[in-house]
Amino acid sequence: MALLLDRHGWLAPSPGVARLPSPNHDARPAGTQVSLLVLHNISLPPGRFGGPEVAGLFLNTLDYGSHPWLERLRGLRVSAHFFIRRDGGLAQFVSTDARAWHAGVSRHAGRERCNDFSLGIELEGTDTLPYTDAQYAALRRLVPVLRARYPLSAARGHEHIAPGRKTDPGPAFDWKRFGRDCGFLRRQLPPV
Ligand SMILES: [Zn+2]
């Protein structure tokens, strides 16, 4: 079933698409064009998949005491527009029209604060474990829908817009495959 983005920037409910509105967002600066797609990975604790922790982090409902590693996240206020699980399941946390808090201190093509002008997609994973076919398939469904709404002229990893600080989505992500699937030209992808 094709994905539909409603006029408020939310995917229409359908099987495998969850809408989990996060309070961690605000308005983009007036008149800002959304032109960049940023890909990330996340798993909490790192390397553990399938649990409720990532959604909990983005919704400020994470049980920080449930694992020692999670303590360091206490007080963090973050989000992404989308989260794609290992099985391809999609969750949306922030309207695409709003500013999600995924990039932090960042720069792309000389512009700082990439959250202002980007969409953020989190892939459940780690930097080194290959992403699943279901995740690439979900990107292939989702990204063209986003590109039909926003003039996305480039796709980058968090590692490219915050080098030295971030390493995701890491060497495990196949940018060539992603570019082919989602119609990004080589010059629109991270330089190799
Ligand atoms: Zn990231």
Image (cartoon, helix red, strand yellow):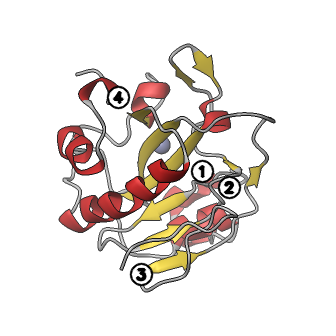
Asked if 13 appears above or below 28 in the picture, the reply is below
In the picture of the structure, the residue carrying the numbered disc 3 is 16
Secondary element at image label 1: helix
Secondary element at image label 3: loop
In the picture of the structure, the residue carrying the numbered disc 4 is 188
Residue at the (60%, 18%) spot, across then down: 111
Cα gap from disc 3 to disc 2, whole angstroms: 29 Å
Q: Nearer the viewer, mark 4 or mark 2?
A: 4
Residue at the (45%, 32%) spot, across then down: 153
The amino acid type of the residue labelled 1 equals: Arg
Query: Counting other residues with Cα less than 10 Å from the Cα at mark 2, is it few (<14), some (14-19), or many (20 or more)?
Result: few
**Number of residue marks:** 4
Q: Nearer the viewer, mark 3 or mark 2?
A: 3
Image quadrant where one finds the N terminus: bottom left
Asked if 119 appears above or below 138 in the picture, the reply is above
- Seen from the viewer's position, the closer of residues 26 and 6 is 6
Query: Counting other residues with Cα less than 10 Å from the Cα at mark 3, is it few (<14), some (14-19), or many (20 or more)?
Result: few
Cα gap from disc 3 to disc 1, whole angstroms: 31 Å
The amino acid type of the residue labelled 4 equals: Gln
> Left or right: 60 with respect to 180?
right
Residue at the (47%, 77%) spot, across then down: 17
Look at the numbered discs 2 and 1 and tell me whether their residues touch, using CB distance below 8 Å: yes
